[in-house]
Amino acid sequence: MTVAEWGLFIVVIIVAALLAYWIGRNGAKPKEDVWRPQELRDAEIAYAEQLFRSNGPVSVVAKLDRAYRHRNRRIILVELKTRQVNRVYLSDIIELSAQRFALEAQTREAVAPHGYVLVQQEGNGDKKSHRVRLMTHTEVIMLVAHREAVLFGEMEARYTKWPRLCRHCAFRQECRPPMYPGHS
């Protein structure tokens, strides 16, 4: 090999090493890491698709989508949703709050007072995570008690302010909301 060929060989090796280093640091991330908020980048999955139960003042059974263990050992919940619009609903917060209540009751692990709703939009597959404040344990207990009072006929149910929710409700046949625009 000539001196020029050796020089070219060394340059190619250096460029390849730099490229490999850059790809390793900044290159393709695992698919799951792309949507993760900064807070969860170094967290590890603690639970996935598991059922948890609480006993005590109220019984709550909740199946969580994902729970990540943060560096500080606190669990952070993530709810996965596929929908047409990129938004969070109150039902998402209630669901995550019930998961927190049941998970803490069963495992005695500390769960963060906030969680994330990951929305994947139908059609384009875009994913966006939304940080949400979870309900307190007292609020969850009050919500469960309210639900039970309605189910046992001790309290009258209120109809939704959003009539479009009725279209997919499991109780649509039994429920007869007052006739006003949108409820059918």
Image: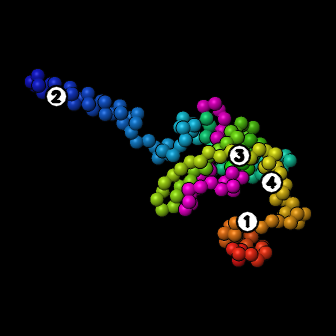
Place residue 81 in its image quadrant: bottom right
Q: Earlier in the sequence, mark 1 or mark 2?
A: 2
- Image colouring: rainbow
Residues at marks 3 and 1, CA–CA distance in whole angstroms = 22 Å
Q: Earlier in the sequence, mark 4 or mark 2?
A: 2
Under mark 4, the amino acid is Leu
The residue carrying mark 3 is 134
Q: Earlier in the sequence, mark 2 or mark 3?
A: 2
Q: On residue 8, which mark appears?
A: 2
Looking at the rendered structure, the secondary structure element under dot 3 is loop
> Which dot, 1 or 2, sits closer to the camera?
1
Q: Compared with residue 125, is residue 33 higher up or lower down, i.e. above or below? A: above
Looking at the rendered structure, the secondary structure element under dot 4 is helix
Q: Earlier in the sequence, mark 3 or mark 4?
A: 3
The residue carrying mark 1 is 161
- Percent x, y for residue 64? 66, 50
Under mark 1, the amino acid is Lys
62 with respect to 10 (left or right): right
**Circle 2 residues within 10 Å: few <14, some 14–19, many ≥20:** few
Give the extent of the magenta segment.
71-95
Residues at marks 2 and 3, CA–CA distance in whole angstroms = 60 Å
Under mark 3, the amino acid is Leu
Task: Specify whether residue 95 is in view.
Answer: no
105 with respect to 49 (left or right): right
Residues at marks 4 and 2, CA–CA distance in whole angstroms = 71 Å
Place residue 17 in its image quadrant: top left
**Circle 1 residues within 10 Å: few <14, some 14–19, many ≥20:** few
The residue carrying mark 4 is 143
**View extreme (front): residue:** 181
